[in-house]
Amino acid sequence: MSYLEGTIKKMLPKTYIRKHVAHEIYVAISHFKDMVPKMDKYIYNDGTAKDLMSLTGTIPALFADNTYNIPICLWIEESYPETAPICYVRPTR
């Protein structure tokens, strides 16, 4: 386990499968260097809030021979990997 992966594992509450989730996040940020992991408050559609791990940043997308950096946010629920991450595109000007 790398230092960064260990740091991510320490960020995660014990309600997560910490070793697995930390490794998955480490792999993602190794491929997408602009992604930043952090614990943040997620507001569900019914108004309830919960602290979840998020990955925020941009991912490159090739379209018509041009690369566009798409701003996204992935929310990883405590039940991951049983449930898929919640994904949003965060439009910018």
Image: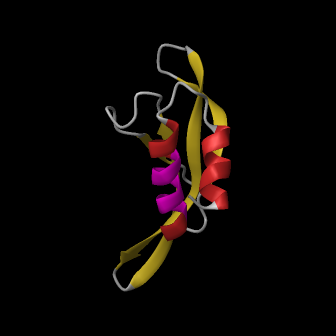
In the current view of this chain or complex, which residue is farthest to the bottom? Answer: 65
Coloring applied to the structure: secondary structure
**Main SS class of the magenta portion in the image:** helix
Please give the name of the residue rendered at 48% of the width and 37% of the height, measured from the top-left corner.
76
Q: Is residue 39 left or right of residue 75?
A: right
Q: Position of residue 18 (x, y in %)?
A: 52, 38
Does 31 sit above or below residue 20? below
Q: Is residue 63 left or right of residue 33?
A: left
State which quarter of the image contains the N terminus. bottom right
Please give the name of the residue rendered at 53% of the width and 47% of the height, measured from the top-left corner.
22
State which quarter of the image contains the C terminus. bottom right
Q: Position of residue 86 (x, y in %)?
A: 42, 38
Q: Position of residue 23 (x, y in %)?
A: 49, 52
* Residue 24 sits inside the magenta stretch: yes
Task: Count the numbered circles shown.
Answer: 0
Q: Which residues are magenta?
A: 22-29
Pick the residue in front: 83 or 72.
Answer: 83
Does 65 sit above or below residue 91? below
User: Which image quadrant for residue 80?
Assistant: top left
User: Is residue 47 visible to the viewer in this orientation of the structure?
Assistant: yes
Pick the residue in front: 14 or 33.
Answer: 14
